[in-house]
Structure formats: C-alpha cells, structure tokens
Amino acid sequence: MATGFESIDEWYKGHLGCLYQQRVLKIINKLLPDKRFTGYALDAGCGAGNYTITLSEYYDSFGADRSEILISKAMSRSVSMGREADFITADLQCLPFRSNIFDLILCINALEFVSDADKTMEELKRVLIPGGTLLMGICNKYSLWGLVKFLGKPFRREDPFFKGKFYTVEDITKLVNGAGFSIERIESEIYFPPTNIKVIALNFEKFARRYLRMFPGMFIISLRKKI
C-alpha cells in the first residue's frame, strides 16, 4: 500500500532531514528508560526504519508502517547495516501483535497523519506492557513548521504533510490522558525553519533556542501506561 510518504526517505537523506533526525535522536537517547538491552520495542510508523535501527541497539526491535515501499527500504537498510530488526506492513489502528508485549514504543511524527488519533492511542496502549514507556514526537501547531503547513495547505493538497493535524500541549495532554497514559516528561526540539539551506537553518536555530523557546517545531513526550 502506498501512503504518499514514500519520498520521506529521500528527505531524511538531505541536509534538512539529517539535521532533523540528529536533533530527534539526541532527545530519544536522553529519554530512553534506564533499563535497556532487555525486552521488546516497537517503532510505530517507522517509515524507512531510521529510528527502529537505533532502538535495535538496546531492544529486540520491530518497525510497523502502512507503506510497503518504506518497509522494504527499512528491511534493506537494516540488513546493510548489520542490525537485527523486524519490519511489518501494518496500520497503527490495527496492529498484528498480542496485547501487553512491548516494553517501549516509539512513535515519531506518525500520530499527526493517522485518520483516528484516539483509536491509534488505544491500540498503542493495548500492545504496551503495564507501566511501559511510549515516546512520542508530535509537531507543534504553534511553530514555524505549523505556520508553513497552514499557509501552504491550500496550494499543496496532494502532499500528505499538509493534510496532517499538528497539536498544542493542551491537545496532547487531553489525548493521552483520555487514552490511559500519564505524562512523565515533555522535551522541546526543532528550532530551525523548514529550509534546506543548512547555514540559514543552523544560524536561525541558535537565535530561536534563545529567543523563541516557546515555539519549538515539535514536542517529544515520554508517556507511561497506567497500571
């Protein structure tokens, strides 16, 4: 199944995508639970497997995505890097795993683009063990990235990025509490604008981290499944 996000792998290979991934991985490593090297982890909405492969350093890792093309790329990348990770084509609203199996779930920039966020959260909770950790990366509605999406939506209707729903902290809090999670920690990240000109991105990032801390491009949230 094609999802419209098949080009995301090429984006991650560019200057902007590489910078984005570096910043996100820094926070993920900061928020990973202390207990590593044991149990199972799921990268929900894994794309071409960039974050799944990172998880495979610590866990028996699985990646799930609706795009067969991206799953194929993820498999090839995992093999080429000599990493052990399993990948499966699946909808996040109907995961083919038994309940209470994963110690950790990673879901980066996927919830914004599902058709039913509440149902997706319920499914992620189902496959996570009681007391397990869910790390979510969600685009901030009130950011430069959110502004670009808002202004560009009338002209980019076929681009799935412009169809997504970005969230405020209040939106996220309401969603996760309703799904049976407690918020452990919220980190802010992505302070550069959506430009492929690296020098502009890095210089603006320095300015934004100092003067625009309230308007990050995304939030990375550590959640705990309530027991």
Image (spheres, rainbow, N blue to C red):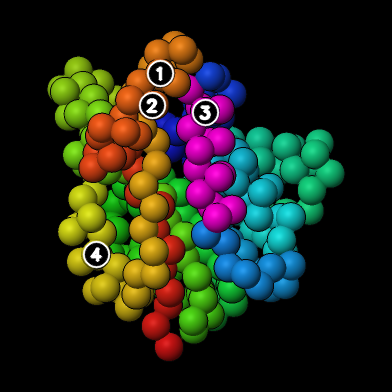
Residues at marks 4 and 2 touching, judged by CB atoms closer than 8 Å: no
The residues tagged by marks 2 and 1 sit, at their Cα atoms, a distance apart of 5 Å
Residue 217 place in picture, x, y as percent? 32, 37
Determine if the magenta segment contains residue 19: yes
Q: Nearer the viewer, mark 1 or mark 4?
A: 1
Q: How many marks?
A: 4
Q: Residues within 10 Å of mark 1 (few under 14, many from 20)?
A: few
Q: Which residue is mark 2?
A: 205
Magenta stretch bounds: 16-30
The residues tagged by marks 1 and 4 sit, at their Cα atoms, a distance apart of 32 Å
SS at circle 4: helix
Q: Which residue is mark 3?
A: 19
SS at circle 3: helix
Q: Which residue is mark 4?
A: 173
The numbered disc on residue 203 is 1
- The amino acid pointed to by label 4 is Thr
The residues tagged by marks 1 and 3 sit, at their Cα atoms, a distance apart of 13 Å
